[in-house]
Amino acid sequence: MKLTLLFKSNKARFMININKQKLLLGLSVISVLLLVSSRSTHSPDENIARIQYVKTGLDEQASEVSLLKTNTEQRMAGMMLKLADMQTQILRLDVLGSKLVQQAKLNPSEFTFNQIPSMGGPLDSSTIDIQVQDVILSRISDMLNKIQNKAQELSALESIMLSHHINRESKLEGKPVLSGWLSSYYGIRKDPFNGLPSMHKGLDFAGKEGEPVLATGAGIITWSGSRYGYGELVEIDHGGDLVTRYGHNKKVNVKVGDVVTKGQSIAVMGSTGRSTGPHVHYEVIHKGKQQDPLPYVYRKSS
């Protein structure tokens, strides 16, 4: 295929022959020039449009973040008010517990009602961040633990005060140690090894390793040696379906069949068996079932 262009005037005459390849090449060049010209004309407008679109998206995101911050601050303010209310409840428990300890004529050092609790206050919203939230959540957890512990101590106080009316069918009374402190109560508690709720069927009296462990009443030794969970254990039958157990001893001073008297040293304090430190695990068993030993520990002699 060939295209002939003829140009004719009074003074000159031109004739150009263009084949198919030259025609296609020429059209391609013209198309590129038109495209470049068009892009150079509209490119700034398109860039401005893109910038405006991105800016609009950023503005919307900024508004969402601002709203989230406001909502977070409101929730955190609510949490702080709840913390303040919990702190007030703890203070009331402390006051009540201290009065009960005084009325029952007990040793205040064995309870934690007189300890100064942690204090809280309003939180500046400008300081709210992830770390602050972690601190607040940790403080809430600590307060819940304190409330649970103080509620347990109040239950113990109630049990002690009711002990004044216990039927004196047994002569069990007093602590199984000369010195030391009550480190864990009877009832549901957090297991010291796995952290799960578990039933603690006795009292723990912490002290120094090597301190004497005392019989809380006269009786006959029915167990003397190792027992799963208890470590080195001493068990005394006091008659009247009453039995006491003394666990986690470093060593025992009696053997099965021995007759012991109240206050006699039957073992040496240690941390054998399932134990986290030197203490005596003390149990009172009536008719084959563990009882709360507190009423017997604090009962008054007739």
Image: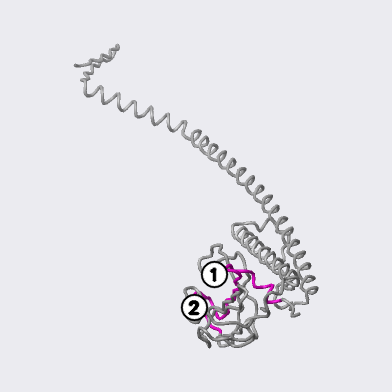
Mark 1 vs mark 2: give the one in front: 2
Q: x%, y% of residue 96? A: 78, 67
Question: Which residue is nearer to you in this view: 35 or 180?
Answer: 180
Q: CA distance from mark 1 to mark 2?
A: 16 Å
Q: Are the two marked residues, 1 and 2, in contact with CB atoms closer than 8 angstroms?
A: no
Q: What secondary structure is marked by label 2?
A: strand
Against 253, residue 137 (above or below) is above
| Extreme-left residue of the structure | 1
Quadrant assignment for the C terminus: bottom right
Q: What secondary structure is marked by label 1?
A: loop
| Left or right of 42 in this view: 33 | left
Q: Residue at x 67, y 48 (%)?
A: 70
Q: Amino acid at mark 1?
A: Pro
Q: Amino acid at mark 2?
A: Gly
Res. 174 mark:
none
| Left or right of 26 in this view: 242 | right
Quadrant assignment for the N terminus: top left
Q: Is residue 61 magenta?
A: no
Q: x%, y% of residue 234? A: 54, 80
Q: Which image quadrant for residue 244?
A: bottom right
Q: Which image quadrant for residue 264?
A: bottom right
Residue under label 1: 192
Residue under label 2: 231
Q: Residues within 10 Å of mark 1 (few under 14, many from 20)?
A: few
Q: x%, y% of residue 181? A: 65, 79
Choose the circle earlier in sequence order: 1 or 2: 1
Identify the magenta region. 269-298
Q: Residue at x 21, y 24 (%)?
A: 21
Q: x%, y% of residue 56? A: 57, 38
Q: Is residue 290 magenta?
A: yes
| Left or right of 136 in this view: 31 | left
